[in-house]
């Protein structure tokens, strides 16, 4: 797929991180907590680098920093669940973005078919089994096949300009 002869590929390093981040902050997205499990270990991390890949087969991807604890669990467990947050769940997004060890004690949840926690009150859940993974830069793109989904008639939480927002304010 790569156009190896393109002169643009010679613009080697690309732009600096700061203007890149400033531009990408203008990209509004939903917010997920990506949960994972391997044996008795469970974890959750807030992630916005998530999207649908194809509907048939049903594939979704999440982009995960290799330095995160979640990365190791997804590699070991070969599964993840996308908990698509609803408006009003900013507290969960903030908690699961923290760097310390996290527990699910204060986060009401069920256990999904993959064993990954499914947070209650979400706009949707997408449980995936890892189908492929691709390392890019500091992150890994995990592509998962959805084996179980659910959705509710709730407005999704939005993230834009480094802030949590509602659809009305975007
Ligand atoms: C709004 C928001 C979106 C984020 N999106 C991602 C993401 O898509 N991928 C990622 O690797 N980290 C993302 N992070 C950072 C992780 O949530 C954070 O590094 C977390 O502490 C990782 O947890 P863990 O080390 O327990 O897995 C995001 C953080 C915030 C606040």
Image (cartoon, grey):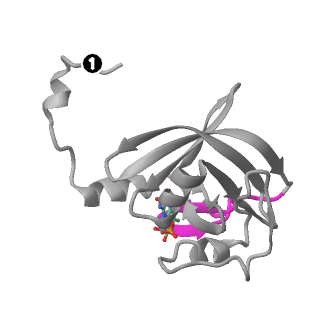
Work out whether 125 lies above or below 14: below
- In the drawing, does residue 4 fall left or right of residue 166? left
Identify the magenta region. 154-169
Location of residue 154 (image quadrant): bottom right
- In the drawing, does residue 114 fall left or right of residue 54? right
Work out whether 95 lies above or below 68: below
Predominant SS along the magenta part:
loop
Is residue 23 found inside the magenta-colored segment of the image? no
Q: What secondary structure is marked by label 1?
A: loop
Q: Residue at x 74, y 57 (%)?
A: 115
Q: Tell me the quarter of the image containing the N terminus.
A: top left
Q: Residue at x 35, y 43 (%)?
A: 136
Is residue 163 found inside the magenta-colored segment of the image? yes
Q: Exactly how many numbered labels are in the figure?
A: 1
Residue that mark 1 sits on: 3
Residue furthest out toward the front: 39
Task: Note whether residue 169 is visible.
Answer: yes
Q: Residue at x 63, y 49 (%)?
A: 79
Q: Residue at x 27, y 18 (%)?
A: 3
């Amino acid at each position: 797929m790569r156009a190896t002869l393109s002169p643009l590929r010679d613009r080697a390093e690309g732009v600096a991180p700061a203007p890149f981040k400033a531009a990408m902050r203008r990209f509004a997205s939903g917010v997920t907590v990506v949960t994972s499990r391997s044996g008795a270990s469970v974890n959750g991390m807030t992630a916005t680098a998530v999207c649908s890949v194809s509907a048939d087969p049903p594939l979704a991807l999440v982009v995960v920093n290799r330095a995160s604890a979640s990365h190791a669990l997804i590699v070991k467990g070969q599964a993840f669940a996308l908990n698509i947050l609803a408006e009003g769940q900013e507290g969960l997004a903030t908690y699961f973005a923290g760097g310390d060890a996290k527990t699910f004690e204060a986060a009401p949840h069920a256990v999904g078919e993959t064993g990954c926690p499914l947070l209650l009150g979400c706009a949707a859940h997408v449980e995936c089994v890892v189908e492929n993974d691709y390392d890019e830069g500091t992150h890994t793109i995990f592509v998962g096949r959805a084996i179980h989904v659910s959705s509710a008639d709730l407005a999704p939480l939005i993230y834009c300009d480094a802030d949590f927002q509602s659809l009305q304010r975007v």
